[in-house]
Amino acid sequence: MLWEIDAVGADDGADVRAIRARLDLDSGYLSRLLRRLEEEQLVRVQPARGDHRVRVVSLTAAGRAELLELDRRSDELARSLLAPLHDRRRARLVEAMGAVEQLLTAGLVEIGVGDPASSAA
């Protein structure tokens, strides 16, 4: 959740609705998650400046430190997984990852009939 708050957020914080939509989460579940992070003093949830009906969430200093630690651990794990592989195996892994990305991306493409007179055509 810390990564998502950081990714969606700006200087004023991340709109809770945007995070909920991005992750397709139930609003009650997201509220419980945010409440837990607030209790741990990792995030701050408050009304938006321009519209008090909108809630925004931002990382606290402790939340930023936790996010940096999680990033460090993630990088360390990736290095430990790749370190035993020699160059040829790393190349095969990169090739396989490219194939996975291509297959997943191809699944998002929609082909349909369009109006040839439209501006998009």
Image (cartoon, grey):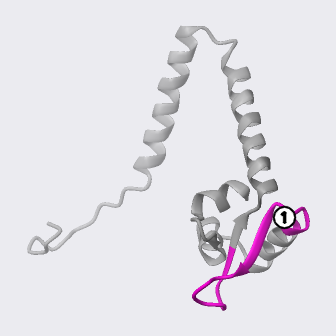
Report helix, strand or loop for mark 1.
Answer: helix
Image x and y of residue 47, in percent: 69, 84
The correct choice, above or below, for 50 with respect to 78 in the image is: below
The correct choice, above or below, for 47 with respect to 4 in the image is: below
Which residue is at a point 10% across and 70% down the rendered structure image? 116
Quadrant placement of the C terminus: bottom left
Report crowding for label 1: few under 14, some 14 to 19, many 20 or more residues within 10 A (C-alpha): some
Magenta stretch bounds: 36-56
Total labels drawn: 1
Which residue is at a point 69% across and 23% down the rendered structure image? 79
Which residue is at a point 13% across and 74% down the rendered structure image? 118
The correct choice, above or below, for 17 with respect to 3 in the image is: below
Q: Quadrant of residue 16?
A: bottom right
Q: Quadrant of residue 74?
A: top right
Q: Is residue 20 magenta?
A: no
Which residue is at a point 77% across and 56% down the rendered structure image? 61
Q: Quadrant of residue 15?
A: bottom right
Image x and y of residue 23, in percent: 64, 65
Image x and y of residue 55, in percent: 68, 81
**Residue most toward the left?**
117
Quadrant placement of the N terminus: bottom right
The correct choice, above or below, for 30 with respect to 47 in the image is: above
Image x and y of residue 65, in percent: 78, 48
Residue under numbered circle 1: 37
Q: Is residue 38 magenta?
A: yes
Amino acid type, callout 1: Leu
Q: Is residue 106 left or right of residue 9?
A: left
**Residue most toward the right?**
39
Q: Depth check: give the residue in front, 58 or 34.
A: 58
